[in-house]
Amino acid sequence: MTLKHILLHPDPRLKKVCAPVEGVTPDLGKLAEDMLQTMYDAPGIGLAAPQVGVMQRLFVMDCVKGQDEAAKPMVLINPEVTWTSEDRSTYEEGCLSIPEQFAEVTRPARVRMAWTGLDNQRHEEEFDGLWATCAQHEFDHLNGKLFIDYLGPIKRQLITRRMEKFKRERARG
């Protein structure tokens, strides 16, 4: 497994709509494994392909947080939202592409998604709680949308400026 480099906002690739995955291949399986390892190492609970510079409709997630609970890594290829609840929930979201920046985002409390798995079979599941938030957050990445796009312009601009400064400082070493 290889840890992938995570793109940081602002990067124009994070604002692009991703192309559908054409087929489940061994290379795609390797990419998914690498993405899961990168996500766990970061640490995070979700990672979308565009965050590692791959402009395809694929994301991974695992929202199991308890030390005594078994991990539940998921790989969603060409996911589609098939239903969202009318009730809403608000979570403080962060993003591996926007490190150390957090903000409350309100989304549907439950969401149903359909996707292709690495087994090349169609899957469908309804997510709630943190799983629903994560699935929607990662799905947004595939459409060029970041969690800060849900914020007001002043807060969004403030976070973007912080990230520009963070990237400059990191580049200087």
Image (cartoon, rainbow, N blue to C red):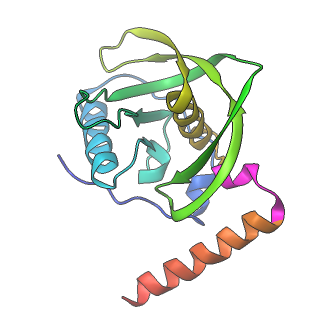
Q: Is residue 161 above or below residue 95?
A: below
Tell me what residue is drawn at x 58 percent, y 43 percent.
141
Q: How many marks?
A: 0
The quarter of the picture where residue 46 lies is top left
The answer to which of 43 and 140 lies nearer the viewer is: 43
Q: Is residue 35 above or below residue 116?
A: below
The quarter of the picture where residue 4 lies is bottom left
Is residue 118 rendered to the left or right of residue 151?
left
Tell me what residue is drawn at x 37 percent, y 9 percent.
121
Question: Residue 30: x, y in percent?
Answer: 24, 37
User: Farthest residue in the left direction?
Assistant: 1
Tell me what residue is drawn at x 44 percent, y 9 percent.
122
User: Farthest residue in the right direction?
Assistant: 153
Numbered range of the magenta stretch: 147-153
The C terminus, quarter of image? bottom left
Q: Main secondary structure of the magenta part?
A: helix
Tell me what residue is drawn at x 34 percent, y 22 percent.
24
Is residue 13 rendered to the left or right of residue 104?
left
Question: Residue 115: x, y in percent?
Answer: 48, 18
Is residue 15 rendered to the left or right of residue 172?
right
Question: Residue 130: x, y in percent?
Answer: 52, 33
Question: Residue 87: x, y in percent?
Answer: 75, 22
Q: Is residue 150 magenta?
A: yes
Is residue 90 rendered to the left or right of residue 73?
right
Q: Is residue 112 magenta?
A: no
User: Farthest residue in the bottom direction?
Assistant: 172
